[in-house]
Amino acid sequence: MSDTHVRDDSARLPDGSDPISIFAARVLDVLVDRSRRTSSTLRPDLVHALANGMVTPDGDRIEETLAAFRRACISPAAMADVYIPAAAQQLGARWSSDRLCFAEVTIATARLQALVRAIGTRWGGDPAHLPGRRSVLMVVPGVEQHTLGAVVVTGQMRRMGLSVCLRLGPDRTELIELLRSRVFDVAMLSIGHDERLEASRKLVDTLRSFGPRGMPILAGGAAVAGRTDLADRTGVDFVTQDLGEALALCGCAPLVSVGAQAPATISLRG
Amino acid sequence: MKAIDHNSATGGSIASIPPDLMGQIIATASDLALILSADEVIRSVLVNPHHRSFGTLNQWEGLPLRKVLTVESIGKFEARLQELIAQGGTRAVELNHIDDQSFEFPVRYALHRFAGDGTILMLGRDLRPIAEMQQQLVKAQLALERDYEAQREIDTRYRVLMETTRDAIIVVSMTTGRIVDLNLAAAVLLGGSRQDMVGAAIAQEFEGRRRGEFLESMASLAIADSSSPLELQARRSHKRLLVVPTVFRAAGERLLMCRLELADLGDAQRDELTENLFGLFHEGADSVVFADMDGMIRSANEAFLNLTDSASLAAVKGRSFGEFLARGAVDLRVLSDNARRVGQMRMYGTKVNAAYGGQISVEISATYLNDRPQPFFVFVVRDTSRAEALRRPGLNVTEDGGRSIMELVGSSTLKDIVAETTDVVEKMCIETAVELTRNNRVAAAEMLGLSRQSLYVKLRKYGLVGNEGDQP
């Protein structure tokens, strides 16, 4: 740390700090703040790099991509909430344009999901010193192929301090057992396919019969987009793709602020 | 079936293949071949005679192709066909068929279009074996996710138990002799941090014990059902401890659980300050970071891990403290330079690249501990984001910063201040770029939008050439 830029020591403050450096650091602070405001928008190049990294199983490349996210000051939370769903959508689009085989898309999506797990190991909604938080049951019907959306949203809710129980394709007996042993404030269903709504309807019946009286049941997921009859056909109380709205609808306001990347950008898209 | 016009690229002897034989060749070259008229009606279906699992599919003949495709496949087919018409050549497309008699099945086609009458030849490869594997993968992943969720619940219970119990507990692998897990109470008794000691050799935590000897005595003590625990001295904390072992197996691994107790309760009183400092470090609200002379983190407390959303001490140890600060190396430089000069620096305002996307405003104090062969820095990071919200927006000038600007304005002209600030800012940015690119000058120049030549000139101007680790 050689400093050939010698300045008169008399310019230092009584505590020894160098006023020019501090002033310059503050100028940079303002610049950083300004640039951060513009960088809060989604960066397509990073989405692209992430999707590519998942298709080619090259450890170095994934590490490189993660380093690019760190350099861009994109937090693990933003990565999970915004970039991973965007990359999954891009993978789907690549199948549509025949640039990827469906099996490649499935494998790449599984890798994305593993990434959500890897970066979210510490996202727990169950800290020992803060009991008595709201509890959510998130269910993915057994006929669904995609669980990424539900896993992402579960991570978001856990970060908000909600205690979330995620159940993937539970059978009826398992669900009844669960509802008998635990009390949930709200139940959510992640529905990706609108062709298999019968399974969701049955799940809702079970939730109504065995869950606490008046427990709100919500549905979200890709099937929600562009459909108005989903609530009628499945029997849920609310249908939404917006987690913030979902929690507001059932009176489960987040107990912990999740910072600047508030749930406004979150969707339940599967 | 129609005769096929194939006089273009392949030409030659292929042209002489009789149409009937050509049909056979097409049928056997693919699993399923379709011939469509220009208006996308299926004229012929050729199923490979050696691959009859589709059945005959004769019922498709005369139907528009879209009638045997799933909804999302219709759009795909149309898009590829338009590309084929516009650009010629061949196109590959993955389509999902629906058929009354069977479920959906995926086929990968190569599309060929005959220039003359617009007939479309589709040579298909059955993708059902791949689809089957894909379904297996989906199931495997579901099972994995279920396991993960179940494990998560058990983990939570285990973690709460370990953290709330007052008993000091260590779990050791009997095979490797290394610590698999320990709770905070145990770490405090042994005199280290929890993160540091996970993975450490247990025998080395006690004075005068070799690995084999330690494990052996523990194992025999556990089996002996003896009521008197082993008394040992911890190497780091120098405390005399009573160790009560239990041996058990988990998934084939032989584990040793040791409960630690203070042998002499008087120790606790003698060591009150250490205990309290330990408590402050582990439980305190402010982040505490110990870093070496280069700013590399040697140790940090839980508060710092929480502030930066880091998974464990291992995730931050060995990384530069600057990495966690909004202005990177610049912040670190200001802190460490000033602290080194006079031993400490107070109330330095910056931001920490923090959990959940945002940045958290902090005030950092730096202390330079020079009373040892290897001096190091202690940074105490205090979250000031709440106080910040109450301040006016724009230049967040803390009292200290304001004072510094007043000093400046009183002693220099505006021109001098701006010139000097520009120099400092320029130097800081260049240093940061050099550090970010790991001293790759070409990349650093590119990052700064400078020519290599200009970067060299500036590096020389600010005395940044020939620093430790520089490449020529």
Image (spheres, coloured by chain):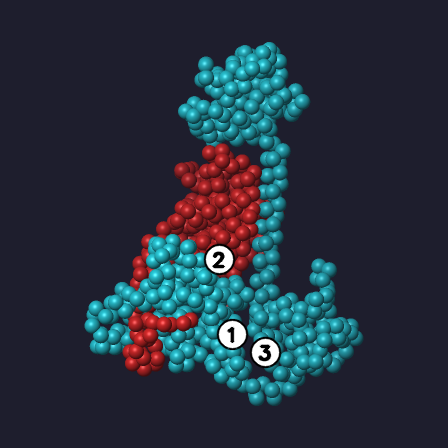
Q: Is residue B68 left or right of residue B426?
A: right
Residue at x 48% of width, y 48% of height = A50
| SS class, disc 2 | helix
Please name the residue that numbered disc 3 is placed on: B191
Instruction: Say what amino acid the circle numbered 2 marks.
Output: Arg
- Few, some or many residues within 10 Å of mark 1 (<14, 14–19, 20+): many
Depth check, mark 1 against mark 2: the one in front is 1
**Front residue (pair B56, A141):** B56
Q: Is residue A33 left or right of residue B11?
A: left
- Provide the letter of the chain coloured red: A
Determine which quarter of the picture holds residue A145: top right
Please name the residue that numbered disc 1 is placed on: B282
Quadrant of the rendering where the N terminus of chain A is positioned: bottom left
Distance in Å between CA atoms under marks 3 and 1? 12 Å
**Front residue (pair B77, A189):** B77
- Residue A180 position, x and y percent, is 58, 54
Query: Are dots 3 and 2 in contact, CB under 8 Å?
Result: no
- Residue B450 position, x and y percent, is 34, 55
Instruction: Say what amino acid the circle numbered 1 marks.
Output: His
- Provide the letter of the chain coloured cyan: B
Disc on the earlier residue, 3 or 1: 3
Distance in Å between CA atoms under marks 1 and 2? 24 Å
Subunit ID for the residue under disc 3: B
Distance in Å between CA atoms under marks 3 and 2? 33 Å
Please name the residue that numbered disc 2 is placed on: A158
